[in-house]
Amino acid sequence: MSVSTSQFPLTRPGRPVADAVGRTPKVRTIVQIYEVVRTAHLERAVELGEGVTILYRGRRYDFDADVARGVDVLRRGLLASTWHALTHRVDVIEVNEPLVVRAATRSLAFIVAARLRARVVGDPRPVAVAYAIGNMPTAQMLRNLPLKAGARHRLQRLLAPAVWRALDRVAFGTSQAAQLYGEELSGRRDPETELIEALPTRDPEATGDPRPETLAFVGDLSERKGFPALLAAWPAVRASVPGARLVIVGRGAGEDDARRLADADPQVSLLIDPPREEIYRALRGAKVLTLPSRRRPLWREQVGLPIAEALAQGCAVVTTDETGIARWLRDHGHHVVPEEAVERELSAELVAALTSRRTPEDVWSDLPSRDGRESARAWMYADGEEEQP
């Protein structure tokens, strides 16, 4: 499998596009099949416009019913999803990435059924695509799953190569994902692939004014997100940078520890589960975002939403090599600590980031002009004719 980093000409996905002779606009029918749907999926569907249907099994805690009212979103299991494919025209199918193995049966059944229907009725063959950011090796998953769950995972994993071969395009959001799929699924019949890093664009609300020596932690106040490691590093940071401030934003198991620190240290402030705009406001006032993620037996940081949000706001980032975009961060002047060295090196990297001359403008100069997820979607959904230079 070869992963290209070149930029394909991109279309605006899901909008009416000219037909083959350039006369009559058409709306392509897009079906997105997810095991679990969240508000971000709904928001992206709204951006795509008409012709988009989401079929899902379950909802994330952040499912926004108000956003869902503007989307054709349907709860469908294996049989109902397959029936939908047999009874509806579909031009583009987006499925969960192949290594989300619990989704493999439903994904494969839908692709096969949709293509069978198209052949019978004479419609164009549906294009099948996926967006991949998975970076957890199967072998590690199997070592750490309980016996019954491990047996189920092994059975479901058998279908992953078939899903991979059924796909026409796979966009990788991180270099770690591209590497993992190259090691686990690359073979004789690979889909077309493209590495488009999951990077944001500059938030137009943010300014390039110099920032005070403020450090932000945003996210789950848990061990896997590195919150205890930050608490352990903070005294050394405060001693080295007397004017440093710490803003803790989130919720989770470490809330009591966060409250105790904020009560004891006037240079620490705490925001428990604030609305999104308040999170952005906190990041706009911070010079550095830290998310020192730690690998757990069944979990690894794929990207880290706070990292993407912080980059958009112009923050320097201090994280570990567990995030899927670690290589990009390191190559562009951010601070990446080896996960096994967090206890030894985190405080020094935080001090270096807080005292550096790096400005928000420096951070933004490395970001793409178009959001990475949007670019990936446009490349995946592009019409064949429009891919030509």
Image (cartoon, rainbow, N blue to C red):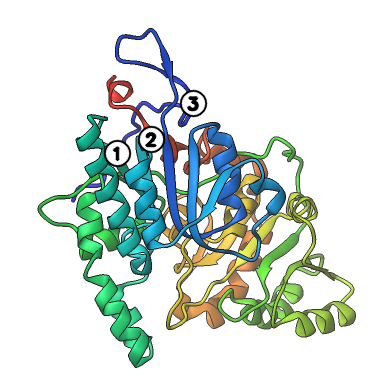
Quarter of the image that includes the C terminus: top left
User: Element at badge 3?
Assistant: loop
Q: Give how far across and how far down residue 93 sits, in percent.
A: 36, 44
Q: Is residue 377 left or right of residue 308?
A: left
Asked if residue 50 is positioned above or below residue 158 in the image, the reply reads above
x 74%, y 38%: residue: 205
Of badges 2 and 1, the one in the foreground is 1
Three-letter residue code for mark 2: Tyr
Q: Give how far across and how far down residue 374 sits, in percent.
A: 49, 39
Q: Is residue 17 left or right of residue 181?
A: right
**Mark closest to the chain's N terminus, 2 or 1:** 1
**Mark closest to the chain's N terminus, 1 or 3:** 3
Which class describes the residues within 10 Å of circle 3: few (<14), some (14-19), or many (20+)? Answer: some
x 42%, y 43%: residue: 31
Asked if residue 100 is positioned above or below residue 30 in the image, the reply reads below
Task: Name the quadrant containing residue 351.
Answer: bottom right
In whole angstroms, how far apart are the C-alphas of marks 2 and 1? 8 Å
Q: Is residue 359 visible?
A: no
Task: Name the quadrant containing residue 100.
Answer: bottom left
Q: How many marks?
A: 3
Three-letter residue code for mark 1: Val
Which class describes the residues within 10 Å of circle 1: few (<14), some (14-19), or many (20+)? Answer: many
Q: Which residue is mark 2?
A: 381
Residue 136 versus residue 94: which sits nearer the camera?
94
x 28%, y 72%: residue: 156
Q: Which residue is mark 1?
A: 127
Which class describes the residues within 10 Å of circle 2: few (<14), some (14-19), or many (20+)? Answer: many
x 43%, y 60%: residue: 324
